[in-house]
Image: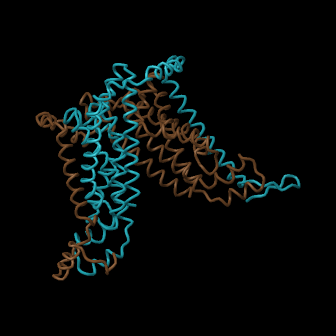
Chain colours: A brown, B cyan
């Protein structure tokens, strides 16, 4: 705002207040009408949204005991009674996580190469981008429902689901990374008469490798968290055990499973931070 | 770069021999681990189901096309519920995450013990998927939209809290020092030195989480927490795949729209 601009009503009010020693920060939206319209519409939305919620307070009061029981069970988680099921479920979850991440990343690399505008022709680019869009729109659990319907119950459907979701995630970020690479090495290697494969391996790969490793580890972490969920629809892993324990109100076992998930996620986060520091 | 003499010819290699062996050993171990995992999965898979997987897929897609558009009208109310679950849930989550982030950030935390507590809350909230929170909350507050909102809020606390406290830790310390030097109190420093610096990040994070929450809210109905997922679950249980396809199309449209809104807003504030 230039000082010579004629002061509007609000500005002169501000100036008058300033002379009295009262300072207020500038409002975020200068036009008062817009400000009020925005506030009013937010308020209106809150009222409308609240009207659509019907909270059954009697049911909530009844459930409060269960809520407290659940909180209490975190202080005395029961790892033993269902120890066998928890161990089998966790082992299945972890193997699913690793297998799906490896398969997903391996498949994501060609898709990612194809989806980078600077190194691939337009038809390939569009094809790979549509694979990415398809894989990213739907939640893992929806994809899992479809794959369970096709492949039957069991961890294979889970692995295929997680691998499919991994392709979209990794290929998108990899393609963005390839598009951000420096052009000089690409031109230099091409000038030596390298074949396409040599070109990708010696010009593109060294530039994106550290980030690719970091992202793969991050995806490993996400896949583990998701593997705890897709079991609900029958795609294997710890989710089925967790679902059963919650439905039976066996909160001590649920708490044990949740604590194990939290600990494994924490460990993998710590580990991936360490590996990332080491690769960069 | 090591040059290895093979006869009289020097040969260029990428790594020293010892490092090369270690590299190979690493790949070997990784491969073995993968094969072992695959063997475990294969053991627990009923391969007979797979013989007709292509027929199953074809018949599934065949029954999905064309989608049953006649139910679109009855899906509008659940769709509105889904958007409400995501929006109100995000708002609730932000409301709790905001003070938590100030407790968790190293430079604004009043006490190390409070910081540890805030970090623990953020980590537990972040490790557990909204669907799991929803399963728990349905048994506690009963099925419906309210459980969905709380589930979204609980999951959002960790996400928003983590990104926000990282943003707070990255602020420039000079404005804080300058304001402290004028004799400003703790809250004044937060309001006039810290808040203006993190506001764009805060708006970006909130909208980003809202976008993710729209996607997550579409699935919460699977465990009874309201929204369009309820209709999807009912259609799947009835094997009415044409109706499932309609739900998918609506979800797709909603997700694309929310992604567009979120990209616009983030572009405007960042």
Which residue is at the front of the view, A39 or A136? Answer: A39
Residue A194 appears at what percent x and percent y?
Answer: 76, 51
**Residue at horizontal 25%, vertical 81%?**
B182
Residue farthest along the left direction in this orientation: A58
Position of A64 relative to B199 (above/below)? above
Q: Is residue A19 left or right of residue A82?
A: left
Q: Quadrant of residue B144?
A: top left
**Residue at horizontal 35%, vertical 31%?**
A83
Residue farthest along the bottom direction in this orientation: A19
Count all numbered tags in the image, as a single digit: 0
Q: Quadrant of residue B223?
A: top left
Residue B76 appears at what percent x and percent y?
Answer: 28, 33
Residue farthest along the front direction in this orientation: A6
Residue B238 appears at what percent x and percent y?
Answer: 34, 19
Position of A199 relative to B202 (above/below)? above
Which residue is at the front of the view, A129 or B95? Answer: A129
Residue A253, visible in the rendered structure = no
Which residue is at the front of the view, A84 or B124? Answer: B124
Residue A100, visible in the rendered structure = yes
Quarter in which the N terminus of chain A is drawn: bottom left
Quarter in which the C terminus of chain A is drawn: bottom right
Which residue is at the front of the view, A81 or B194? Answer: B194
Residue A40 appears at what percent x and percent y?
Answer: 20, 54
**Residue at horizontal 37%, vertical 32%?**
A239
Q: Is residue B52 left or right of residue B201?
A: right
Q: Is residue A184 left or right of residue B200?
A: right
């Amino acid at each position: 705002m230039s000082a010579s601009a004629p002061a509007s009503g609000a500005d002169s009010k501000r100036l008058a207040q300033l002379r009295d020693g009262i300072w207020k920060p500038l409002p975020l939206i200068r036009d008062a009408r817009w400000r009020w319209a925005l506030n009013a519409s937010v308020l209106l939305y809150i009222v409308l949204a609240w009207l659509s919620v019907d909270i059954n307070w009697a049911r909530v009061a009844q459930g409060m005991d269960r809520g407290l029981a659940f909180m209490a069970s975190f202080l005395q988680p029961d790892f033993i009674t269902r120890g066998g099921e928890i161990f089998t479920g966790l082992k299945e979850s972890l193997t699913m996580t690793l297998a799906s991440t490896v398969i997903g990343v391996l498949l994501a690399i060609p898709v990612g190469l194809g989806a980078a505008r600077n190194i691939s022709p337009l038809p390939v680019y569009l094809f790979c981008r549509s694979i990415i869009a398809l894989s990213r729109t739907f939640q893992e659990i929806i994809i899992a429902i479809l794959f369970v319907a096709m492949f039957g119950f069991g961890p294979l459907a889970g692995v295929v689901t997680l691998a499919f979701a991994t392709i979209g995630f990794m290929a998108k970020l990899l393609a963005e990374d390839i598009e951000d690479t420096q052009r000089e090495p690409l031109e230099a290697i091409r000038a030596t008469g390298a074949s396409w494969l040599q070109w990708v391996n010696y010009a593109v790969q060294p530039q994106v490798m550290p980030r690719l490793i970091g992202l793969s580890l991050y995806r490993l972490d996400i896949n583990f968290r998701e593997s705890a969920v897709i079991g609900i629809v029958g795609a294997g892993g710890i989710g089925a055990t967790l679902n059963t324990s919650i439905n039976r109100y066996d909160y001590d076992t649920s708490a044990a499973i949740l604590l194990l998930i939290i600990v494994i996620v924490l460990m993998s986060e710590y580990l991936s931070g360490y590996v990332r520091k080491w690769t960069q | 770069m090591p040059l290895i003499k093979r006869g009289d010819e020097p040969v260029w290699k990428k790594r020293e021999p010892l490092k090369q062996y270690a590299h190979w050993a690493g790949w070997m171990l990784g491969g073995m681990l993968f094969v072992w995992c695959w063997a475990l999965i294969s053991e627990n898979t009923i391969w007979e189901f797979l013989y007709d997987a292509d027929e199953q897929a074809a018949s599934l897609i065949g029954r999905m096309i064309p989608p049953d558009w006649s139910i679109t009208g009855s899906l509008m109310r659940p769709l509105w519920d889904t958007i409400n679950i995501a929006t109100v849930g995000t708002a609730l989550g932000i409301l709790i995450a905001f003070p938590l982030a100030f407790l968790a950030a190293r430079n604004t935390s009043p006490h190390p013990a409070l910081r540890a507590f805030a970090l623990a809350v953020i980590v537990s909230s972040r490790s557990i998927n909204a669907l799991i929170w929803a399963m728990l909350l349905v048994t506690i507050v009963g099925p419906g939209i309210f459980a969905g909102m709380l589930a979204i809020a609980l999951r959002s606390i960790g996400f928003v809290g983590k990104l926000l406290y990282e943003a707070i830790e990255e602020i420039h310390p000079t404005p804080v020092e300058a304001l402290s030097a004028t004799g400003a109190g703790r809250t004044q420093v937060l309001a006039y030195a810290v808040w203006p610096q993190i506001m764009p990040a805060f708006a970006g994070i909130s909208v980003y989480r809202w976008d993710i929450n729209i996607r997550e809210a579409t699935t919460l109905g699977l465990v009874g927490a309201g929204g369009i997922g309820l209709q999807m679950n009912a259609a799947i249980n009835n094997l009415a795949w044409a109706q499932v396809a309609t739900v998918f199309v609506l979800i797709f449209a909603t997700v694309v729209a929310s992604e567009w809104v979120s990209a616009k807003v983030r572009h405007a504030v960042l």
